C-alpha cells in the first residue's frame, strides 16, 4: 500500500497539519507501506518554495521519514505540483477529445448570483449548466474575448463509499448542477484535478486527510471513474479514504493558517521538543493515555511500534490545549 501527506506551502506548518501527517504516517508504517510527501503548490499566488522547504525542515525535525518526495526523489520526476502542469494539461486534452469537459465563460459576478442560500449563514454554490450546451461558433467568439475555465461534464449519479472514520457516505451528484472547474480561466489547475491525477500517478492507495475535505470526495471519485473510462486504464483505482477530525483550540476555533495557529517553529522556539509535540497530539487524539507517557513525550518511531490500531475517530473535532 501507499499513503501520503500532501500539504500546501502557504504558511509554516502548524499542529493541525502535523496531526493529519501523523495519522497518515502511522497508518502507512503499521501496514509496512510506502510513504509519499507531495507539495501541493498549484496556487502560485499563495504558495512559496521557501515555505515548502521550511515545511520539509519541520517534518524532518519532528521525526518523519518519507520514501518518495522532495529531497528523496522517487519514480516521479518531481513531487512539487507546480512542476507537474504539463501532465495535467495532457490529461485535460484527453478529456476534451472525449467531450468530457467544456469551456465556461461565466464570470465571478454571475456565479455568485446563482448561488442559493437555503439556510441562514449557508450558501450552496451550484452551477446551472449555463455554458455546457454552447455551440462551437459561440465558443470561438467568446474565446476571443475571454479565456474560459474548463468544467467537467457530470452525469447525475449516486456515489457510495465507506470512510474509515466517518462511515458509509452516500453522495448524489446532480448532473449539470455539479459540473465543477478543473482549470480556471487564469490557467490555474483546480485542487480536485491535481490531487486525483497525482494520487493516480504516484499509486496512492490510502488517503487520510481532514474532515473538512470530506465533501469533495464524491467529486473526486467521479473523476476517478471518468478517467478509468477515458484512458481505458485498469490501473486507475479509487483509494480508500479516512477523514479525521480537525483540531480545535479551547475557544472552538479550528487550527489553521488563517487563524494564525501555533506553528511548529513557534513551539520549537519556546523550547518544546519534537517528542513533546508528538506526545501532546497523541494524547489529544486518544492514541495513547497521558499516564502512559513520561513528561507527555514520545517519538514518532516509538509511537509506530505501539499497537494503536488507530482508534475510531468519528467525531468532527478534537480539542487540544497548548
Image (tube, rainbow, N blue to C red):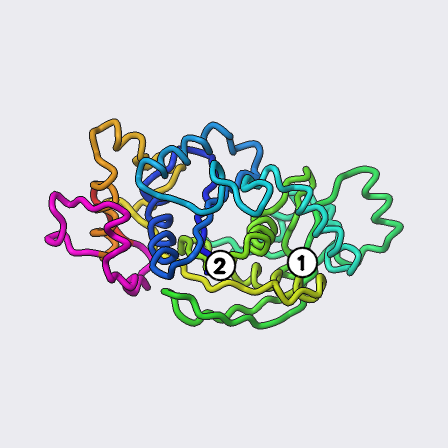
Residue drawn at x 29%, y 64% as measured from the top left = 309
Q: Mark 2 near mark 1, Cβ–Cβ under 8 Å?
A: no
Frontmost residue, 269 versus 251: 269
Q: Is mark 1 on a helix, strand or loop?
A: loop
Q: Which residue is drawn at 55% across and 39% down?
A: 80
- State the image coordinates of residue 53 (x, y, percent, origin top left): 45, 31
Q: Mark 2 points at which residue?
A: 215
Residue 247 is situated, as x and y percent measured from the top left of the image, at: 31, 49
Q: Is residue 309 magenta?
A: yes
**SS label for mark 2:** helix
Badge 1: few (under 14), some or many (20 or more) residues near its Cα, within 10 Å? some
Sequence-first tag of 2 and 1: 1
Image coordinates of residue 39 in percent, x first then y, are 50, 41
**In the image shown, does 121 or 307 lie closer to the viewer?**
307
Q: In this view, does 35 lie to the left or right of 291?
A: right
Q: Name the residue under label 1.
A: 128
Q: Is residue 258 above or below residue 240?
A: above
Query: How many other residues sit within 10 Å of disc 2, few (<14), some (14-19) or many (≥20)?
Result: few
Q: Quadrant of residue 85?
A: top right
- In the rendered view, tell whether residue 195 sits above or below residue 61: below
Rendered residue at 26%/44% (across/down):
249
Distance Cα–Cα, label 2 vs label 1: 19 Å
- Residue 298 at x, y percent in the picture: 20, 46
Span shown in magenta: 288-317
Counting the numbered discs, the total is: 2
Q: Is residue 138 magenta?
A: no
In the image, 202 versus 110, the foreground residue is: 202
Question: Residue placed at 25% from the left, 52% from the top?
Answer: 303
Q: Is residue 66 above or below residue 204?
A: above
| In this view, the mark in front (2 or 1) | 2
Tell whether 156 sits left or right of 79: right
Amino acid at each position: 500500500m501507499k499513503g501520503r501527506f500532501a500539504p500546501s506551502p502557504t504558511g509554516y506548518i502548524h499542529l493541525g497539519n502535523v496531526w493529519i501527517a501523523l495519522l497518515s504516517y502511522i497508518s502507512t508504517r503499521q501496514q509496512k507501506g510506502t510513504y509519499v510527501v507531495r507539495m501541493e503548490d498549484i496556487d502560485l499566488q499563495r504558495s512559496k518554495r521557501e515555505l515548502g522547504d521550511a515545511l520539509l525542515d519541520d517534518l524532518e525535525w519532528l521525526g518523519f521519514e518519507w520514501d518518495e518526495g522532495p529531497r528523496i526523489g522517487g519514480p516521479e520526476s518531481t513531487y512539487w505540483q507546480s512542476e507537474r502542469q504539463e501532465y495535467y494539461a495532457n490529461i485535460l486534452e484527453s478529456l476534451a477529445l472525449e467531450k468530457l469537459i467544456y469551456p465556461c465563460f461565466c464570470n465571478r459576478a454571475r456565479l455568485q448570483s446563482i448561488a442559493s442560500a437555503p439556510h441562514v449563514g449557508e450558501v450552496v454554490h451550484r452551477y446551472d449548466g449555463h455554458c455546457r450546451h454552447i455551440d462551437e461558433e459561440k465558443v470561438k467568439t467568446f474565446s476571443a474575448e475571454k479565456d474560459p475555465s474548463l468544467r467537467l461534464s457530470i452525469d447525475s449519479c449516486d456515489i457510495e463509499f465507506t470512510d474509515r472514520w466517518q462511515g458509509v457516505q452516500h453522495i448524489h451528484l446532480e448532473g449539470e448542477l455539479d459540473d465543477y472547474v478543473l482549470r480556471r480561466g487564469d490557467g490555474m489547475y483546480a485542487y480536485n484535478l491535481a490531487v486525483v491525477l497525482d494520487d493516480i500517478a504516484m499509486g496512492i492507495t490510502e488517503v487520510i486527510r481532514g474532515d473538512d475535505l470530506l465533501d469533495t470526495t464524491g467529486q473526486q471519485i467521479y473523476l476517478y471513474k471518468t478517467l478509468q473510462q477515458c484512458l481505458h486504464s485498469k490501473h486507475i483505482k479509487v483509494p480508500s479514504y479516512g477523514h479525521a477530525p480537525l483540531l480545535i483550540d479551547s475557544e472552538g476555533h479550528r487550527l489553521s493558517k488563517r487563524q494564525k495557529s501555533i506553528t511548529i517553529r513557534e513551539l520549537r522556539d519556546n523550547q518544546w521538543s519534537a517528542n513533546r509535540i508528538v506526545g501532546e497530539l497523541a494524547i489529544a487524539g486518544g492514541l495513547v493515555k497521558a499516564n502512559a507517557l513520561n513528561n507527555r513525550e514520545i517519538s514518532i518511531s516509538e509511537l509506530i511500534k505501539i499497537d494503536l490500531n488507530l482508534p475510531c475517530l468519528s467525531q468532527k473535532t478534537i480539542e487540544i490545549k497548548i
